[in-house]
Image (spheres, grey):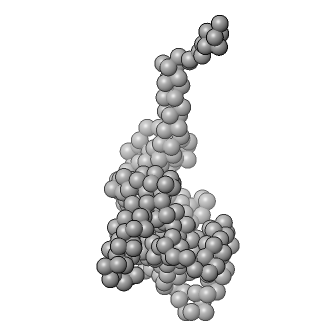
Amino acid sequence: MTKAANAVPIRRGNPIASTAVMYVILILFAFICVAPFWTLLVNATRSNEEINRGVSVLPGASLVENAKSLVLGRVDRHTGERMQGINVPKGFLNSFIIAASSTLLTAYFGAMTACGFALYRFPLRKFLFGVVLAVIMIPSTINLIGVYKLALTLRMTDTWWPLILPSIANPFAVFFLKNYLEASLPRSLVEASRIDGASEIRTFHTVVLPLASPAMATISIFGFLSCWNSYLIPLIIINSNDLYTLPMMIQQLNTTTFNRDLGALYFGIAVSIVPIIIAFAFFSRYLVEGLSVGGVKE
């Protein structure tokens, strides 16, 4: 007998059962992701007393009241203390200016630095890229004192500059875009542009940037989300109420443990995530494309 005749047949599992298990796991993960957002939206429609009674999966009837409390403020029923509202449009504008400016700087200068690492060979290239990787590993909270002292020395406290300018040197953007360019940018296009007489900066703008647009969109989404949700660094830099970002304004509602409007607080948080959802909805295609292409090298 041949070996083929003596071979033991391979038992295959039930495909229906495997598919069912996969769907159960996916539904479980979807529930874990959606549950916090649903709780946030539900609490945005409930009163302060209803929220203190416990968690509910059904919306309440205090949405309009919470919106008025967020914008106009309210008087505490127990202490009679007047709780001030916040200027939501001003907070949106301030956060958008900071997030948009930081995002543009991160994408542009990150691509320029990554292009230098990907296309050029120069002394200490690997060492400098190792320094970039090492900086990624350092938690941002460790730099808070140094950032504040530097801003104080340069007389930039109580301004937006310390929140925007550091985006020029984003190590994660350099790391991600460098790997993307090495995987998807044909060097023949760069050489052809140089033969045609284009300068290096023109080659960067006409050849590298168009090809790197999916990865730049991915980095832009991450950068925008990070800047929009940033709270700690603006808290130690900004003192004037007119310069407050939206997260800082929402935090003003959380005054004390016994005197805070939880309904307005949840409503403010729900409103603040609307730009994030819009940005992700418009650029999610680029996010998937940038992650899939940049993760595979030819």
Pick the front one: 99 or 170: 170
Pick the front one: 207 or 139: 207
Q: Position of residue 160 (x, y in %)?
A: 47, 81
Which quadrant of the figure has residue 88? Answer: bottom left
Q: Tell me the residue at 38%/45% (across/down).
A: 61
Q: Tell me the residue at 62%/81% (across/down).
A: 123
Q: Is residue 25 visible?
A: yes
Q: Position of residue 266 (x, y in %)?
A: 47, 54
Q: Tell me the residue at 49%/24% (across/down).
A: 19
Residue at the extreme front of the image, as rendered: 1
Residue at the extreme top of the image, as rendered: 1
Marks counted in the figure total 0
* Residue 289 placement, left or right of 78: left
Q: Is residue 205 visible?
A: no
Q: Tell me the residue at 39%/73% (across/down).
A: 191
Q: Position of residue 110 (x, y in %)?
A: 48, 73
Position of residue 115 relative to residue 46, above or below, is below
Pick the front one: 130 or 67: 130
Q: Which quadrant: the N terminus? A: top right
Which quadrant of the figure has residue 185? Answer: bottom left
* Residue 178 placement, left or right of 215: right
